[in-house]
């Protein structure tokens, strides 16, 4: 039997990591499988020859997207044409819906029988819920990372959606604190964000938050994990801080999580990492003035992933004008000591872990099985 051909399209760095893990799992299940597509360094290490550099399309936020719109349009056209010409057995689009979904719609119009699997659900449960129903026209199955997403798609009239599990569950051994970590945690993790705009927006706020905390206690160290490409910008923002934090690389990140007493974090996947590492946290987020105008479209009671996973707002969050240094310091004080608020988060962490493990098998292996299921349907499409 002819080996299946899978075309994968990732749109940014986290999608590249997901795509690489999926490629490994697909190859384990079907050693002669063939790949083509768009990806980054991680997918290249698995043998993918990308149509173009991932940096051409890895942009986030309204203003950056508009600035690079002509190039993005060209890359969408180029990708869609390559898929149509190759006629693979299945197309897998990975996150980055502003790019990947446009590609998928064009491919569906040209090759209606080609199965299309979307790895990572757009946040239809948070805003623009009409996207779920619209996806039925060009997506056959959504592979969800979060356990509540299949129910959300069913409620909103979206395509088939299967919870395959979050990739973090494959790293639980690295995240889970050892018994000796639990009693002597004294560091405060500060995570300003993974994008340059977030770092510039949140770091000054966090510095002022530390000023409030240091007025009452100084028995904690501050640790900031930083990616190499963000270090220069972060050091620039840290010049006004009341103390010098310890910067660590990504290789040390999870060890720092296991040893941390509490965390001040910008909303994102890091909140889920902290929950699995059992680090009590206060969460903040601010966006630009233009983006803040879209808040009226958001229809969830929390933007913190652990809160969404368990359906209860246990981890405190401070958004936009509520993300003030005084408010954040007030939320962190009880977390640095012994308190009911701290205990409540530990109970919530156990619930988060249990829910994320509901899928059972390794997420990438479960995702690979579903992709191969659709590839078998797509022969000759």
Image (cartoon, helix red, strand yellow):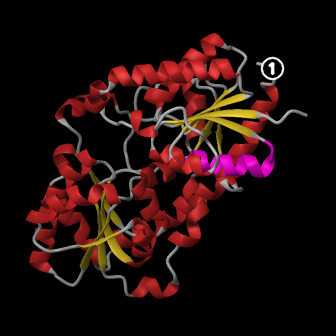
Q: Residue at position x 39%, y 58% from top?
A: 314
Residue 223 vs 100, above or below: the answer is: below
Q: Residue at position x 22%, y 72% from top?
A: 333
Q: Nearer the viewer, residue 253 or 312?
A: 253
Residue bearing mark 1: 380
Callout 1: SS: loop
Residues in magenta?
18-32
Q: Main secondary structure of the magenta part?
A: helix
- Residue 355, percent from left and from top: 59, 56
Which quadrant would residue 83 be assigned to in this image?
A: top right
- Residue 245, percent from left and from top: 22, 73
Can I make out residue 293 in this image?
yes
Left or right, 352 with respect to 333, comes to: right
Q: Residue at position x 15%, y 58% from top?
A: 237
Classify the position of the N terminus by image quarter.
Answer: top right
Left or right, 367 with respect to 295, comes to: right
**Is residue 277 rendered magenta in the image?**
no
Q: Nearer the viewer, residue 148 or 28?
A: 28
- Residue 275, percent from left and from top: 45, 63
- Residue 59, percent from left and from top: 36, 36
**Is residue 29 rendered magenta in the image?**
yes
């Amino acid at each position: 039997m002819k080996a299946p051909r899978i075309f994968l399209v990732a749109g940014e760095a986290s999608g590249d990591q997901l795509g690489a893990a999926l490629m490994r799992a697909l190859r384990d299940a079907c050693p002669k499988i063939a790949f083509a597509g768009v990806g980054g360094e991680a997918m290249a290490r698995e043998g993918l020859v990308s149509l173009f550099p991932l940096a051409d399309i890895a942009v986030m936020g309204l203003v950056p997207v508009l600035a690079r719109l002509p190039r993005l349009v060209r890359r969408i056209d180029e990708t869609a044409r390559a898929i149509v010409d190759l006629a693979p057995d299945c197309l897998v689009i990975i996150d980055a819906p502003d790019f990947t979904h446009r590609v998928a719609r064009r491919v569906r119009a040209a090759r209606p029988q080609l199965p299309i699997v979307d790895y990572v659900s757009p946040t239809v449960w948070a805003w623009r819920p009409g996207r779920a129903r619209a996806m039925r026209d060009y997506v056959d199955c959504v592979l969800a990372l979060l356990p509540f997403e299949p129910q959300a798609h069913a409620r909103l009239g979206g395509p088939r959606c299967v919870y395959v599990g979050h990739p973090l569950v494959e790293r639980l051994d690295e995240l889970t604190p050892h018994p000796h970590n639990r009693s002597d945690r004294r560091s405060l993790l500060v995570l300003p964000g993974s994008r340059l705009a977030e770092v510039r927006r949140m770091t000054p706020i966090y510095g002022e938050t530390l000023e409030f905390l240091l007025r009452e206690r100084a028995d904690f160290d501050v640790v900031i994990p930083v990616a190499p490409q963000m270090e220069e910008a972060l050091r620039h923002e840290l010049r006004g801080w009341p103390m010098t934090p310890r910067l660590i690389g990504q290789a040390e990140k999870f060890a720092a999580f296991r040893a941390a007493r509490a965390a001040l974090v910008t909303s994102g996947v890091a909140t889920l990492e902290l929950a699995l590492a059992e680090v009590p946290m206060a969460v903040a987020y601010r966006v630009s003035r233009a983006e803040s105008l879209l808040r009226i479209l958001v229809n969830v009671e929390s933007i913190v992933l652990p809160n969404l996973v368990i359906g209860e707002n246990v981890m405190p969050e401070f958004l936009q004008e509520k993300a003030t240094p005084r408010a954040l310091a007030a939320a962190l004080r009880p977390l640095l000591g012994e308190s009911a608020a701290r205990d409540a988060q530990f109970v919530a962490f156990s619930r988060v872990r249990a829910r994320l493990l509901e899928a059972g098998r390794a997420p990438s292996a479960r995702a690979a099985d579903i992709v191969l299921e659709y590839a078998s349907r797509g022969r000759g499409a």
